[in-house]
Each structure stands twice: as structure tokens, then as C-alpha cells.
Amino acid sequence: MPHAIAKVGDTVVADTDSYEVVEGNIYFPPSSITKSYFTPTDTTTFCPWKGNASYYTIAVDGKELKDAAWYYPEVKEKAKNIEGYVAFYKTKVDITSE
């Protein structure tokens, strides 16, 4: 069974046995993130085939990682499988998958 973990240092911020991979990024279901580490930001970006992305800053042990995670609250038809799912910048968060 596939398994993925997102960590900041030694702290697990997301953990799941069910995820989606799109364009080399692992998208975690919203239920798999530890919401207490995540704060929504005003940052948005646009993807022509997915739609508008929103961002989270992740705060762990006094360290803030601005816009370290993103998600698509509403997606275009071809990206329905990742609507609401959360992905992470690999340069800011350690991701492992099996």
C-alpha cells in the first residue's frame, strides 16, 4: 500500500496511505494534514489546467515556512482528483513515499 509523509525537521505535518501524484508532486488529502501547523496566506497562483492555487505557511517549533504548501480549493474538470489536496515545496518540506 502506498504511504507518504511530509515532515518539517522531525515533525510530521502530513501522513497518508492515499495520495495523488501530479507533475511529480505528492498531493495529500486534506484530512491527512495536521491543521494546527498550517495558516492560510493571501498568496495565489494560476495553473491553466488546474485552476487557482491557494497557499499555507507552515509553522513548527517557532520556525515559519512561508507559502510552503499549496492546494486548489476549486479545480478545473481535469484536476478533480486533487481538489482540496495539499502539496508541498520539496525545498521547504521533506517528503517521503513508498
Image (spheres, rainbow, N blue to C red):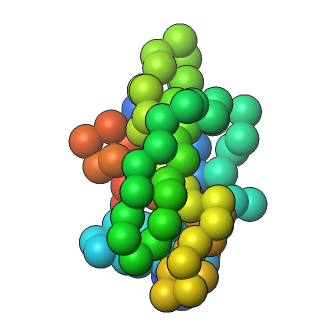
Q: Residue 76 location in percent, x, y?
A: 54, 78
Picture quarter with the N terminus: bottom right
Q: Residue 54 location in percent, x, y?
A: 54, 47
Q: Residue 85 location in percent, x, y?
A: 59, 64
Viewer-nearest residue: 76 or 20: 76
Residue 6 appears in the figure:
no
Residue at far top of view: 62
In screen coordinates, is 89 left or right of 71?
A: left
Residue 22 appears in the figure:
yes
Picture quarter with the C terminus: bottom left
Q: Residue 51 location in percent, x, y?
A: 49, 66
Q: Residue at x 41, y 49 (%)?
A: 45
- The correct choice, above or below, for 28 with respect to 40 in the image is below
Viewer-nearest residue: 70 or 65: 70
Q: Residue at x 71, y 41 (%)?
A: 35
- The correct choice, above or below, for 41 with respect to 14 in the image is above
Occupied quadrant, residue 66: top left
Q: Residue at x 38, y 42 (%)?
A: 93
